[in-house]
Amino acid sequence: MMKHVIYCAAILLAACGCRNARSAEVNKAMQELGQTTENPTMAVVPDDSTEDGAQVGEVVEFDKTVHDFGDISIDDGAQTCVFTVKNVGKDPIAIYEVVTSCGCTDAQWTREPIQPGKTGKITGTYKNEDGPVPFDKTLTVYIAGVGKPVILRMRGLVHEKKKPLSELFGAVKLGPMGLKSLNYKVSNVLQGESSSDEVKIANLGKQPMKVTFTDVSPNLTVEVVPATVPAGETAALRFSVKADPALWGKHVYRATPVINGAKAAKPVTVTALTRGNFASWTPEQRKNAAQCIFDESTVSFGTANAGTKVKGTFTFTNKGKSALKFYSLDADADGVTATLPGEIAPQGKGSIPVTLDTSALPKGETVVMLTLTTNCPARPIINLFLVGLVK
């Protein structure tokens, strides 16, 4: 499938108006693969509106998908980072476009084919011309033969003037290690894939700080880069959650830092929501999939005294052509219990009764969000709301 990716890149470059600007580069890359533009062998690579083609992990691996510049000042000027992409497939690959989210960001990337087992680079630059503001910019990477683009993120916080590390990282202290929080999140984890992120931590001590981790939850990887942080310097805390076929919905993963040989008193937590992955599904499979339609997405329990239990029921219909499955239900409040039904046949109806214990809720108007994970490619995650007044 990947044998003629450079030809496909040329097609797509032409479609987006880039043929004239890059024709020389494409021709050179094709010649290196033994191809010519006059008589290429056809291959099909979808545009960015489809999810056909190989999945990312089958073809390429990135060393990271997020780069956190941390706290910088206006005087620091432009900020640059490098994402490394490795070809883990059997055929050469080509990065044919990297689209930045705005004019304040630039990108450069490896133009020649990346051979199996070899690596290429994507260099992103934030110009740092917008003043003292937080930023979160994206680089959308298109790789020939991969069904959907890869989103890379560059983020940070620009200050008017530099601030001391003790002020920036004084919220949480584990020995000499300063953190802004102990609790982090990654974006949705698709089954068969992983989701990663990184944040900055600081060495607030006067000696080098070596950080490792123990008691690490299954499917979580976590590291500090560099592992030994000089005194008065920052480092990246990188974490990644790999999907577990047995786990669906929201889960909390933990890892306890070991700093200069001493186990920290508290762990770092990473929350992730695992949902279905339909990237490899054909249009026919999607057409014949389950389709969950709720009669109402918001149900009111009315008015209740604090400490009582209230109930609400959400009703739905499977308007698809395959059996409907609910894998999990997660709530953003404590005291929620629910009963998920079994498989619902096509055109079948069902309900989800929910009970909410108001003991832990503050008085006043209450909105509890319920997050369902399903086997519906059109709606793999469905949010429902239980509302009312607690007095």
Image: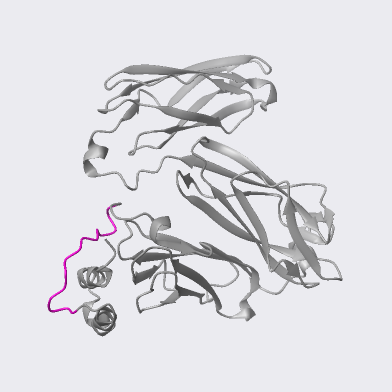
Front residue of 357 and 25 = 25
- Where residue 197 sits: x, y (%)? 57, 57
Q: What residue occupies the far front of the structure in this picture?
A: 90
* Magenta segment main secondary structure: loop
Residue 373 lies in what quarter of the image? top left
Front residue of 22 and 224 = 224
Q: Is residue 149 above or below residue 23?
A: above
Q: Is residue 7 above or below residue 341?
A: below
- Where residue 118 sits: x, y (%)? 44, 73
Residue 253 lies in what quarter of the image? top right
- Where residue 183 sits: x, y (%)? 67, 48
At a point 62% along the width and 26% down the height, the residue shown is 364
At a point 31% along the width and 30% down the height, the residue shown is 291
In the displayed structure image, the side of residue 303 where residue 163 appears, left or right: right
In the displayed structure image, the side of residue 317 where residue 83 appears, left or right: right
At a point 27% along the width and 26% down the height, the residue shown is 319
In magenta segment, residue 311: no
Where does the magenta region start and end? Answer: 36-50
In the displayed structure image, the side of residue 224 where residue 206 appears, left or right: right
- Where residue 271 sits: x, y (%)? 60, 44
Which quarter of the figure is the N terminus placed in?
Answer: bottom left
* Residue 104 visible in the shown view: no
In magenta segment, residue 46: yes
Q: What residue occupies the far left of the structure in this picture?
A: 39
Which quarter of the figure is the C terminus placed in?
Answer: top right
Image colouring: one colour
Front residue of 346 and 221 = 221
Front residue of 64 and 389 = 64
* Residue 372 visible in the shown view: yes
